[in-house]
Image: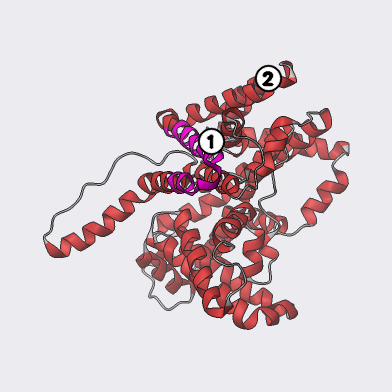
């Protein structure tokens, strides 16, 4: 089940909220856990057992760490091996098999059959949160005694279960014990949810049609202007899609009395890739900083160590997003850009707005194309068409005018929302009746589009 579905909006969420609010406060966590299990089972029943296994294995490991105290490292290693092993098995095993088959094809022609089990919904997100829990407990950053009910509720709570934000137990644990639900919080949460719904359904989904059209035409047959338009359209679609989901998650959490962290801070306003990845998917970046970069030494130990740490972080970031070589290459390209910024020209970018803007206007769409297209051959063709160095096949030179005229208002609106002006305007008019009317129009227009079967999956669900 996705937040931007009629089933969630008109069936699950109203029924859940009614039960959640009418039960005594001491039973709200039980309702949250039960509802979250139903939410997951509704969308991915066959893999619910693996989610529950993850809960029990990680809890047992932490319980044993508490009991062993000074000899807790074996249980930390056991938990990490389980979490990483489960993520590898479901997400990367077929990627490994494909590459082994390439080698075998050149040796004896034999092939290993791929596994047909699908990727459990949200496994990348809930596994990272489980890892953060056991590491924080091992470091004694969590002082509470292990509690299976609280841990299960933290890991499974539906607003953040399948696509984040990625939160640590330290951020949620106290809220599980003591939080306040109020009409004001509910209203603010509902408004955030509707804004996220509009970003997703009205803008991101429809911009996605532009990218689908370009794929249907074939990368060899698009003009250079359309290639650039497609890269800009995909960049906006990806941002509006994931930002829309994050706002819906934060809004749903707020309706339940929780404060979930922001995941985006106007990343397309960044003046460097280093800054960009402090503003984009913030909770993922913090996870890698806290559980990979800092344990490897942080900003200490010289340039060679810096190269090694950044390489590890960005290889893992690329692989986290998908089991495909384009994601690995995407991570390596970001590693190179960020490394060169840190070593050589970050200060120049910080001082010169014009140079920084030109640099990022090129870097953002070019790196997202590598992210969007799985075939490295097709990536090269697309880049070739962007710069006119690959010969086109049956190119319609008027294709740019056609598609720009169809999508210009979506593109302009998406670009406007990349700046903080829309957020400032909302904050200013949040309690105005005009804002309420506008949000009602956004909600019902989104429902109308959903009822007409507009393509709706979240892009980040595949990760």
Dot 2 falls on a residue whose secondary structure is helix
Find the magenta span and give its range. 50-78
Q: Which residue is mark 1?
A: 63
> Quick check: 297 left or right of 353?
left
Q: Nearer the viewer, residue 86 or 350?
A: 86
Q: Are marks 2 and 1 in contact (CB under 8 Å)?
A: no
Dot 1 falls on a residue whose secondary structure is helix
Residue 283 x/y as whole percent:
63, 52
Q: Which mark is residue 246?
A: none
Query: Relative to 78, is 355 above or below?
Result: below
Query: Relative to 2, is 97 above or below?
Result: below
Residue 334, can we see it? no
Labels 2 and 1: the sequence-earlier one = 2
Instruction: State whether the magenta stretch is mostly helix, strand or loop.
Output: helix
Residue 341 x/y as whole percent:
61, 77
Q: Circle 2: is it few (<14), some (14-19), or many (20+) Cα within 10 Å?
A: few
Q: Circle 1: is it few (<14), some (14-19), or many (20+) Cα within 10 Å?
A: many
Residue at the image position 40 percent from the left and 59 percent from the top = 374
Way the structure is coloured: secondary structure
Task: Using the numbered discs, state the Cα–Cα distance from disc 2 to disc 1 in whole angstroms.
Answer: 24 Å
Residue 2 x/y as whole percent:
55, 35
Residue at the image position 65 percent from the left and 76 percent from the top = 358
Residue 221 x/y as whole percent:
40, 65
Q: Which mark is residue 27?
A: 2
Q: Nearer the viewer, residue 45 or 315?
A: 315
Select label 2 or label 1 by which is in front: 1
Q: Nearer the viewer, residue 17 or 91?
A: 91
Could you say which quadrant of the image residue 259 lies in?
Answer: top right
Could you say which quadrant of the image residue 108 lies in?
Answer: bottom left
- The count of marks equals 2
């Amino acid at each position: 089940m996705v937040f931007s579905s009629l089933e969630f909006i008109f069936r699950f969420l109203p029924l859940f909220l009614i039960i959640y609010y009418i039960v005594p406060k001491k039973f709200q966590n039980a309702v949250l856990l039960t509802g979250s299990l139903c939410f997951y089972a509704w969308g991915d029943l066959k893999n619910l057992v693996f989610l529950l296994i993850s809960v029990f294995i990680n809890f047992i490991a932490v319980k044993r760490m508490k009991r062993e105290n000074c000899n807790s490292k074996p249980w930390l290693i056991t938990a990490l091996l389980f979490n990483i092993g489960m993520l590898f098995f479901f997400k990367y095993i077929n990627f490994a098999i494909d590459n082994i088959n390439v080698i075998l094809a050149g040796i004896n022609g034999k092939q290993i059959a791929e596994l047909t089990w699908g990727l459990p919904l949200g496994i990348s997100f809930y596994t990272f949160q489980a890892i953060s829990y056991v590491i924080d407990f091992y470091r004694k950053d969590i002082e509470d005694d292990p509690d299976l009910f609280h841990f299960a509720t933290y890991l499974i709570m539906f607003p953040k279960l399948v696509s984040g934000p990625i939160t640590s137990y330290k951020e949620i644990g106290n809220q599980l014990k003591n939080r306040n639900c109020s009409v004001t919080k509910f209203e603010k949460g509902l408004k955030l949810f509707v804004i996220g719904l509009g970003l997703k359904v009205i803008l991101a989904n429809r911009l996605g049609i532009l990218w689908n059209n370009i794929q249907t035409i074939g990368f060899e047959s698009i003009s250079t202007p359309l290639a650039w338009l497609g890269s800009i359209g995909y960049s906006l679609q990806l941002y509006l899609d994931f930002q829309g989901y994050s706002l819906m998650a934060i809004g749903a959490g707020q309706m339940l009395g929780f404060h979930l962290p922001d995941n985006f801070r106007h990343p397309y306003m960044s003046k460097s890739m280093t800054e960009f990845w402090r503003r984009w998917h913030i909770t993922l970046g913090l996870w890698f900083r806290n559980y990979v970069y800092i344990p490897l030494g942080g900003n200490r130990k010289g340039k060679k160590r810096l190269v090694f740490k950044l390489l590890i972080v960005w290889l893992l970031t690329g692989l986290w997003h998908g089991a495909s070589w384009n994601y690995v290459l995407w991570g390596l390209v970001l590693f190179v850009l960020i490394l060169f910024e840190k070593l050589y020209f970050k200060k120049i970018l910080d001082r010169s707005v014009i140079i920084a803007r030109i640099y990022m206007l090129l870097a953002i769409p070019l790196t997202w194309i590598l992210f969007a297209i799985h075939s490295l051959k097709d990536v090269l063709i697309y880049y070739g068409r962007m710069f006119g160095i690959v010969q086109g096949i049956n190119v319609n030179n008027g294709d740019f005018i056609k598609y720009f005229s169809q999508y210009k208002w979506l593109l302009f609106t998406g670009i406007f929302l990349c700046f903080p002006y829309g957020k400032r305007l909302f904050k200013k008019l949040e309690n105005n009746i005009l804002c309420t009317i506008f949000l009602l129009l956004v909600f019902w227009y989104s429902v109308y589009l959903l009822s007409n079967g507009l393509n709706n999956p979240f892009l980040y669900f595949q990760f």
